Image: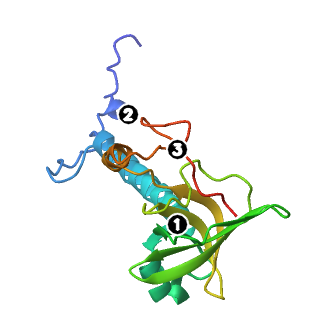
Amino acid sequence: MADEPHAPLAAHAETPAPRRRPRDDNEPAPKRRAGVILAVGLSMGAAAIAALVLTGMQDNAIYSKPVDELLAQRAKFQGRPVRAEGNLVHGSLVKRELPCEYRFTIEKNGVELPVRFAQCVVPDTFRDVPDLDVGVTVEGELQANESFEATSVLAKCPSKYEMQQRKQQGEKMPHGPFAGASFASPAVR
């Protein structure tokens, strides 16, 4: 049986390989597609974080207004944290020992705002000095009775020019570069 011809190899016939469709130039490659998806995801995450931060900041925002503007828009700012800016009204600064508090009035463009500061310590520059406008910024809440409950008081220092001019007129200064030991400031009542 050695002379028998071999049967054709029909079982081993070649099967055609699956044809790949030609790649369209507009279709992104798999790596590029993954990069685009990652970039879009990161952008959306960053936008969400930014929105949360801005929303949180908006709730904690503190407006800063001159006294006249604050009172002109009192309904908008009543009961909210706000800063009020103005000048100390001469003769209005009063200190009470028990309970310890300061009461004073600040004004801007003729509009006055009574302020209560229920703490014992104020800045050294916060003094009622005759013939000197003391700029004051208070932070706190505008009350329904159009008074201001302050949680902090900031007093603007007079300029060096003002201090020099007053020293040349013979006045002793309470603080700053021209400080003198014999300054007699009015007592805080």
User: Looking at the rendered structure, which numbered label has been put on residue 5?
Assistant: none
State whether residue 60 appears in this view.
Answer: no
Cα separation between marks 3 and 2: 112 Å
> What is the spatial separation of the Cα atoms under label 3 and label 1, in whole angstroms?
32 Å
Relative height, residue 115 to residue 16 (above, below): below
> Whole-percent x and y of residue 7?
34, 27
Q: Nearer the viewer, residue 27 or 152?
A: 152
Q: Name the quadrant of the C terminus.
A: bottom right
Q: Which residue is mark 3?
A: 174
Between marks 2 and 1 in the image, the one whose residue lies nearer the viewer: 1
Residue 167 lies, with reference to residue 46, above or below; the image says: above
Q: Which residue is mark 1?
A: 62
Q: Is residue 175 visible?
A: yes
| Along the line of sight, the residue nearer the viewer: 98 or 24 | 98
Q: Nearer the viewer, residue 92 or 57?
A: 92
Q: Residues within 10 Å of mark 3 (few under 14, many from 20)?
A: some
Outermost residue toward the right in this view = 98
Secondary-structure class at tag 3: loop
Name the residue beneath numbered marker 2: 11
Q: Earlier in the sequence, mark 2 or mark 1?
A: 2
**SS under mark 2:** helix
Q: Amino acid at mark 1?
A: Ile
Residue 81 image offset from top left, x and y in percent: 59, 70
- Asked whether the beta carbons under mark 2 and mark 1 sit within 8 Å of each other, the answer is no
